Amino acid sequence: MGTLRKYFKKLKPERTSNIKVVVLCVITATTFWVLNALNKDDYTTVVNQPIRFSYDRQEYMAVEELPPHVKIEIHGNGWDLLRKYFQFNVTPFVIELEDPSRQSYLLTASFQRELAERIAPTQLLGVFEDTVHFKIDKIVSRKIDLQVDTTATTLASNHAFGSDIKIDPPAVSVRGPISVIQQLEGRILVELGEENITADFSKLLPIQLGRDQRKFLTLEEETVHVEFEVIAFLEIEKWLKVNKVYFPANVRTEEEDSVVRVTYLVDERRLEDLEKLDLRAVLNFNNRNRGDSTVAVSLNANPAFIKEVRFDPDKFKLVYE
């Protein structure tokens, strides 16, 4: 047994060497065959030809990604086709556009001859696409109004604007592709960055564009000063006796000695003015609802510093005798 093992050990190095020689011969032969085949001039294939659009980038801007290539069929030398297929040292074909904003596509037939001359001696058999589409806009400058973005939660409960919202500057110059500027619809919203505001506001705020718009537009000003006053309203609750006016003698309410609970909000700065008012709950027969024979409660005065007036009950049933 030990004798056989020694015999096979003696054979292994020689067999390994033979295999290496065979593999090397195969690789060498294959390499020569491939090199010889690539030297032939009778090959046809399909490749992506890189393209580049040339236009005045100070006056125009692409608002969509431009096509990077066109698919073409070519015929020629194996080495040349291999280089073009794997994009080795292939320079893009330049397409000149004088006024790209006036068109959105280009027929490939319009530059096929020039492309054929560019890739010579490789022969151009054809371009697969009929047209090349693009979207390039004219660059313009426009004045766009600034507007504060307010919501129902901008001010705290029972608070209101005590003045107009002042914006300085009221508008900003925006430069970029005209189609993107038109998306602004004539205004840019300014975020206050706060909610439930209870005091007068005066801050310098950034002017922010949407994520998609920031890629195309530039602003002349980047900040705006926003200022406004805030007033607080106090909730008041009272019980008032109902006063009837213009009631005919044959008409009464179901509750003769009626009182109502009234609640309202009053500007805290006008409390002294409120005390001077002789507020009364009124039932005006002339304002009755003929459909259900009721009349709603109202106040005898409605000053600007009182709002959100509510009555309980808010109307009375009429009784005709």
Image: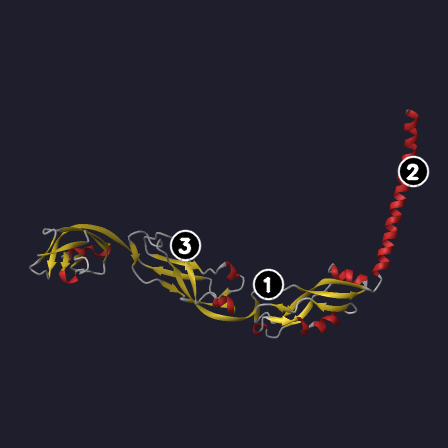
User: Residue 273 appears at what percent x and percent y?
Assistant: 18, 58
- Residue drawn 57% across and 74% down? 102
Task: Tell me if mark 1 has few (under 14), some (14-19) or many (20+) residues whose alpha carbon lies within 10 angstroms of its own.
Answer: few
**Mark whose residue sits in front, 2 or 3:** 2
| Residue 139 in which image quadrant | bottom right
Q: Quadrant of the C terminus?
A: bottom left
Q: Is residue 9 above or below residue 102?
A: above
Q: Nearer the viewer, residue 7 or 179?
A: 7
Q: CA distance from mark 1 to mark 3?
A: 34 Å
User: Residue 59 appears at what percent x and percent y?
Assistant: 57, 72
* Labels 1 and 2 touching (C-beta < 8 A): no
- Residue drawn 18% across and 51% down? 313
The mark that comes first in sequence, 1 or 3, is: 1
Residue at the disc numbered 3: 193
| Residue 299 in which image quadrant | bottom left
Q: Amino acid at mark 2?
A: Glu
Residue at the disc numbered 2: 14
Position of residue 142 in the picture relative to residue 106 (left or right): left
Task: Tell me if mark 3 has few (under 14), some (14-19) or many (20+) residues whose alpha carbon lies within 10 angstroms of its own.
Answer: few
Q: Amino acid at mark 1?
A: Glu
Instruction: Label 1, secondary structure: give it.
Output: loop
Residue at the disc numbered 1: 65
Instruction: Label 2, secondary structure: give it.
Output: helix
Residue 88 visible somewhere in the drawing: no
